[in-house]
Amino acid sequence: MNTFSQLGLSPKTVEVLEKIGFKNPTPVQEKAIPQLLSPKPIDFIGLAQTGTGKTAAFGLPLIELIDPNDPSTQALIMAPTRELGQQIAQQLVSFSANHPINIEVVYGGAAISNQIKALRRPTQIVVATPGRLIDLIGRKAIKLDNVQYVVLDEADEMLNMGFKEDIDNILSFTPADRVTWLFSATMPSEIRRIVNKYMNNPAEVSIDREEKTNKDITHKYIITKTSNKIAALRRFLDIQPEMRGVMFCRTKRETQEIADDLSSNGYAVEALHGDLSQQQRDMVMKRFKTRSMQLLIATDVAARGIDVNDLTHVIHHTLPDQLESYTHRSGRTGRAGKKGISLVFINPRESRKISELEKRIKISFEQIEIPNTDELVHSRINNWAKLIVNTKIDKESEGLLKEVEPLFADLSKEDLLKRLITTQLDHLNIQNGGDLNETKDSRGKNETRARRGGGNENSDINRYFINVGSIDGFTKGDLVHFLSDISDVDRKCFNNISFQKNCSYFDVDKGKDSNLSKKFEGIEIDGREIRVNKDDDGGAPRRKKPESGYNREKKKFGKPSSSKGRSKRFRN
């Protein structure tokens, strides 16, 4: 392996790297830095996952190439989220300690007037989110006509977030002869469009799949009902109090609801999602980095830019729709030479996704069991006992001891400990006390082991299937409205929705689902009959592409005419 000095970096940059603890370059740094420092500027594509050191791969060459005597903006770095933008800027500032250049970061959610004021100073490198940069360009607060280098970091994520038009707009303000460096985890067709339109014969570095997969991460999964996932999570948090990690959810609403549920049960967790103000997000991240919480619950988008090196776990409440994003998520643990665990919660129908992940990114998953109630009790009692043993004795306790000591005079040490343990057991609040694991019976049907072993089953709900999914232009919110409108059942009665491409599953409170299936008879989507059945009644028919609009009189429903706008509202 080469050292940073062998990659062509100057002695004063290498000196800074040694001071901040950068010893050996990562694979993407080793391959990218020499090419980006070449005498003839080149366009460049770097394909690598989160946590592989991409910021240093493009940031260190930029610092070397910038002319500190030129006060104009010479480099522009675009990132999808403010957290990632802040992280990039912080790292560049630390890298440039021996270089007299100025770096500014601009992003939405903060006072634009302060950012305009900062940009009036000589600023050689600007890190920006696309939306805020468009605002600044419109206000003529930033000039990009001298930009020599444009870096698109997490390019695939920027496109997923809908920044395609913004990127095109921003690049139109930069010189035609600029150099473009693009870093991405994946290379979808839209990224190729950017490459073909804006880049000239780019050099490309792709970190092999074996290099992408962090060997310090152990991949595990459990199978349980969707409605039992949070109860299962509580057991893992209880039995591993030293756990410190991030749990990923799909939506902002789900993220906040789970955080509220766990917080109300005494767990040190907080949510991070796009509906929080910048001040709220900063406070959450500050508490997380200072170890004031055990678990951060976040959406994929909000978690971009999280830079914490000592996470023990990454937990996936739901697998991402794009399986490539799994590596993005899991890469937040197992850093800096430490071991980490990536734990996936799936329902029985999702087992094939685990197999697909194993094949696609060449990793091996281990199925594990959700701790049972006996394990949970033993763990809690042991943790409680350790807490007592490690508690420092307060001076005031001596006086109180004299008052209560006579009450225990006739008790042996063993009797006293038994009574203490009994009182602690009385305080244990073990919700969903049965076996939460799911398995398959000999006929291949999914079966909850709690059902076979006499554990508790939720008899207050029924699970239903509907042959409507994302292919119909629906969001989860659209589906709930549709179900409620047709059935005249309150939206609050539809829960635990599993929203898939071709179909969906949902729970309905018993007593509210009378004749539910019949209410959807005659409802059509572009000539295709809608079916709503109990979960074990059968599958979905072949589907056709829907048209727009719902006509209650004709009982025909198609892709909601406002689905585009609604998707934006529900976007993470």
Image (cartoon, rainbow, N blue to C red):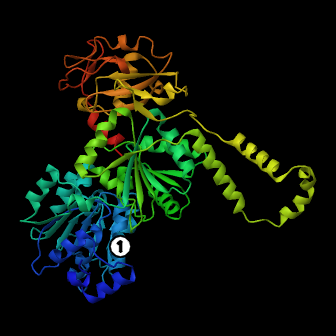
Residue ID at (82%, 53%) = 413
Q: Can residue 488 be seen?
A: yes
Residue ID at (16%, 54%) = 191
Q: Is residue 373 left or right of residue 128?
A: right
What is the x, y in percent for residue 202?
Answer: 10, 66
Q: Which residue is mark 1?
A: 91
Residue ID at (35%, 41%) = 569
What is the x, y in percent for residue 178?
Answer: 13, 70
On screen, residue 121 above or below 317:
below
Q: Secondary structure at mark 1?
A: helix
- Give amino acid for label 1: Gln
Closer-to-camera residue (562/357): 357
The residue positioned farthest toward the left in the image shown = 201
Q: Is residue 203 left or right of residue 268?
A: left
What is the x, y in percent for residue 88?
Answer: 33, 68
On screen, residue 509 above or below 33:
above
What is the x, y in percent for residue 154?
Answer: 26, 59
